Image (spheres, grey):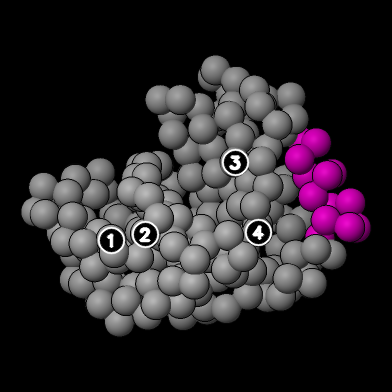
């Protein structure tokens, strides 16, 4: 499975208008595309930053949405609200356990770069050691691991029922403990961001 991540910076006060366009126009069109497997929408209302993640069955399905002009058509719907052109990245989906129809809650996004040749080891550690512990935490709602083998970049997204649940997983020392399990294979320190979950399917 593959994920396209579109990151946009919206003009001040425009995030809710953009969200309505996304829910009412862009998402219905996305569901009709070949290989559609789900989507995740994240927003930070304080900064105007938004991340749209679209999941596709195969790389060919991902490329087809670009070749058909679909992607450009969707960009045009929100272009007047953006403060800058959006960035587009494509990742392999390493781990996906996001339940459909569960919008709401908060997401912690960790971005890092692995050392050469360490990506598969990292995914295995997350699957076998980190996730089983994380699933037991109050308010846990899901997890998505994305990898780009060309540059070693990894994105880890953990979904929580409330921001308080997310914060508790950090103040308890859980996050620090789990990051310690993969610290030896990271080339850069993980960058942490927190978002409101607006779409989850």
Label 3 crowd bin: few (<14), some (14–19), many (20+), radius 10 Å? some
Considering depth in this image, is 115 or 27 the residue closer to the camera?
Answer: 27
Return the residue at label 1.
Answer: 79
Return the residue at label 3.
Answer: 111
Residue 132 lies left or right of residue 10; in this view the side is right
Residue 53 lies left or right of residue 198; in this view the side is left
Residue 1 lies left or right of residue 15; in this view the side is left
* Quarter where residue 76 is shown: bottom left
Q: Nearer the viewer, mark 3 or mark 2?
A: 2
Q: CA distance from mark 3 to mark 2?
A: 23 Å
Give me the residue at 64% from left, 22% from top. Answer: 187
Q: Nearer the viewer, mark 3 or mark 4?
A: 4
Q: Position of residue 57 (x, y in %)?
A: 29, 54
Return the residue at label 4.
Answer: 194
* Quarter where residue 155 is shown: top right
Q: Position of residue 21 (x, y in %)?
A: 32, 76
Q: Nearer the viewer, mark 1 or mark 4?
A: 1
Q: CA distance from mark 1 to mark 3?
A: 26 Å
The residue stretch that appears in magenta = 169-181
Q: CA distance from mark 1 to mark 4?
A: 24 Å
Q: CA distance from mark 3 to mark 4?
A: 12 Å
Sequence-wise, the earlier of marks 3 and 2 is 2
176, above or below 182, in the image: below
């Amino acid at each position: 499975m593959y994920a396209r991540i579109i990151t946009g910076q919206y003009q001040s006060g425009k995030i809710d208008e953009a969200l309505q366009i996304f829910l009412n126009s862009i998402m219905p069109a996305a569901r009709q595309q070949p290989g559609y497997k789900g989507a995740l929408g994240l927003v930070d209302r304080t900064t105007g930053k938004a991340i749209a993640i679209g999941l596709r069955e195969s790389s060919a399905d991902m490329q087809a949405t670009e070749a058909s002009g679909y992607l450009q058509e969707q960009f045009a719907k929100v272009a007047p609200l953006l403060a800058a052109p959006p960035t587009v990245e494509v990742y392999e989906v390493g781990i996906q356990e996001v339940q459909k129809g569960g919008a709401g809650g908060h997401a912690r996004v960790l971005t890092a770069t692995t050392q050469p040749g360490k990506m598969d080891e990292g995914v295995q550690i997350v699957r076998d050691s980190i996730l089983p512990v994380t699933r037991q935490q109050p308010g846990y709602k899901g997890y998505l691991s994305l990898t780009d083998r060309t540059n070693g970049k990894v994105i880890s997204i953990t979904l929580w029922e409330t921001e308080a649940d997310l914060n508790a997983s950090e103040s308890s020392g859980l996050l620090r403990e789990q990051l310690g399990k993969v610290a030896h294979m990271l080339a850069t320190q993980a960058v942490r961001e927190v978002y409101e979950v607006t779409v989850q399917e």
